[in-house]
Amino acid sequence: MTPEEKKEYAREWYQKNREERREYARRYKKEHYDKYLESQRRYYENHREKVIAKSSAYHKAHREQNREACRRYRAKKKLEKLLAMKEEKLRREAGYFKPKKESPIVGGKTFRLDTCPVCGSREVGRIGNKSYFCRSCFREITQHKIYFYDKEGIRRLES
Ligand SMILES: [Zn+2]
């Protein structure tokens, strides 16, 4: 067996038993965590220069890659945030403009009218705070009351 063949054989073996080996390593680490840390520390102390050189070389070699990855990550986060904001806005707007089926007058703090509750026309416009006027049936609609204008032009409460 040449060294290349040996290497190849070892790689194949590892590929075959990879999950098992990983599981074993994980279990070992969990069970002997102190020992593991100690061994890590010892290795670092003994091979300090080597470790630092290796890590710095890796960093230097992959600098552009790292930066690109960081940039992509930040862009992704930004996009996610924007999308969330957009969704939130849409949701709020949908809730805001949603006409109630049983009553066209929407109550609460944000009184809003899309259709006239008397004639069903969409030609309603806001004329004041929580007050709308229908152009089709000439009625003034507020949150709790509906008014109409008589012949003299006096505003009266709709009975
Ligand atoms: Zn109307």
Image: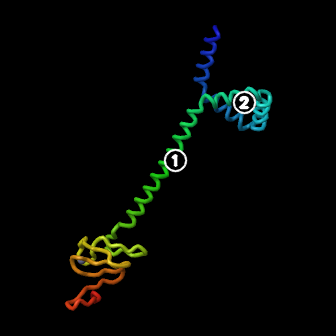
Work out whether residue 57 or residue 84 is closer to the camera in this orientation and state it.
57
* Quadrant location, the N terminus: top right
Q: Residue at x 26, y 77 (%)?
A: 134
Q: Residue at x 75, y 34 (%)?
A: 36
**Label 1 Cα neighbours within 10 Å, binned few <14 / some 14-19 / many ≥20:** few
Percent position of residue 35, x then y: 78, 35
**Left or right placement of residue 19 versus residue 108 in this view:** right
Residue at numbered disc 1: 77
Dividing the picture into quarters, in which one does residue 52 lie? top right
Under circle 1, the secondary element is: helix
Q: Quadrant of ligand 1?
A: bottom left
Q: Above or below — where is 80 with respect to 88? A: above
Is ligand 1 within 8 Å of the beta carbon of the residue shown at mark 2? no
Residue at numbered disc 2: 52
Tell me the distance, in whole angstroms, between the alpha carbons under discs 1 and 2: 32 Å
Q: Above or below — where is 35 with respect to 11? A: below
Percent position of residue 149, x then y: 24, 87
Circle 1/circle 2 CB separation < 8 Å: no
Q: Residue at x 77, y 29 (%)?
A: 48
Dividing the picture into quarters, in which one does residue 99 lie? bottom left
Q: Above or below — where is 88 with respect to 28? A: below
Q: Which residue occupies the extreme top position in the image? A: 1
Dividing the picture into quarters, in which one does residue 153 lie? bottom left
Q: Earlier in the sequence, mark 1 or mark 2?
A: 2
